Amino acid sequence: MSNTEIYKKTLTFSLRRLLMSFLSLMLFLVLCTGGYAILEKTSDKGLIGLGIGAVIAIIIIAIISHFVGYSFHAAQIAMMTKAVTENELPDDVYHEGMRIVKERFTTVAAYYLATSIIKGIFRQVGNLITSAGKAIGGDAGETIGGIISTAVQVLIGFLCDCCLGWVFFRQDQSSGRSTCEGAVIFFKNGKALLRNMGRIFGMGILSLLVIGGAFTGIFYMIATRFGTTFEKLAAEITEAGIRNEIDIPAFFRNSENLALIAGAIAGFVLWNIIHSTFVRPFILTGVIRNYMEAGMKNIPTDSDFGALDSKSPKFAKLHRELA
């Protein structure tokens, strides 16, 4: 199957996440607006009400994402992995993906334990690169190592997804051992897999400029139609600064600038939703293919585990637990 075919067949998971994101955004706007309106009328403290509404919305959204959103993401990775390794997908991609997730991770806690270990391992490997650069070239080497490490940190999200794909692929063994193997695959094939950086950064920046820029402009124009609201908000910010003896920059006390900030925030949120739904899965399909092909050609052995023990304490701890 081609990357495009895999992308199209697994897009159902992205669309479900999109619906969940849209409902979450509506919930956020409703609670923020409601909180502002209620406290503005009752006590003339709309800004505080806005903050309370935002906090409540964030808590609710976080809970939903934690217990529901993870399954869509994991199931999509499972089906991408299946397509890459078996060159086929079932007709009912959605239910098969959800079944595999429940089978591999019987509880939500098991899933988050595996992903937290994966992230920890890759972060430690990234920090190792910085240390190596410093040892080789002093301050200049540290700077170079830091740049490389930063790039690796950007890749962590994709690497975690790939490693999770390997956990789904190696269903004949424990998720702990599969996690170790997944980390070793990147360590052994780092140079080849880092070639994905151009695709990841290029498409990411392009989508941010095009999609994020367009929505920022649109939301800014919408925000300017509510000039009175932003004038009140600017006045409240100014008053709060005086009351608490805080020197708030003039930029944040200007109603037009507040409208621009609101537009930029909304534009970024929409970009993140659209990018995560349509762009990132397409990039991920190609990255997973390269990763899985590298892993299947040379499946990690116990000796490979030992080579990574000294470079990641988190990996070494997991390795010891498997012994």
Image (cartoon, rainbow, N blue to C red):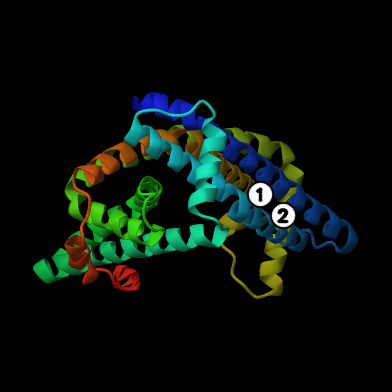
Cα gap from disc 1 to disc 2, whole angstroms: 7 Å
Q: Of 298 and 80, which appears nearest the observer?
A: 298
Query: Would you name the residue on which mark 1 appears?
Result: 255
Which circle marks residue 6 in the picture?
none
Residue 311 placement (x, y as % from top left): 22, 69
For residue 53, side relative to residue 169 (left or right): right
Residue 264 in sight: no
Outermost residue on the left side: it is 136
- Disc count in the image? 2
Picture layout, residue 60 above or below residue 321 = above
Residue 223 in sight: yes
Instruction: Check disc 2 and report its element: helix, strand or loop.
Output: helix
For residue 24, side relative to residue 250 (left or right): right
- Quarter holding the C terminus is bottom left
Residue at coordinates 65% horizontally, 57% vertically from top-left? 63
Residue 298 placement (x, y as % from top left): 19, 47
Residue at coordinates 38% horizontally, 32% vertically from top-left? 83
Query: Would you name the residue on which mark 2 appears?
Result: 233
- Quarter holding the N terminus is top left
For residue 56, side relative to residue 200 (left or right): right
Instruction: Give, as a three-letter code, the residue at label 1.
Output: Ser
Picture layout, residue 140 above or below residue 172 = below
Circle 1 or circle 2, nearest the eye = 2
Q: How many residues crowd mark 1 within 10 Å: few (<14), some (14–19), many (20+)?
A: many
Instruction: Give, as a three-letter code, the residue at label 2.
Output: Leu
Instruction: Check disc 1 and report its element: helix, strand or loop.
Output: helix
Residue 231 placement (x, y as % from top left): 72, 50
Residue 129 placement (x, y as % from top left): 21, 63
Q: Of 251 and 221, which appears nearest the observer?
A: 221
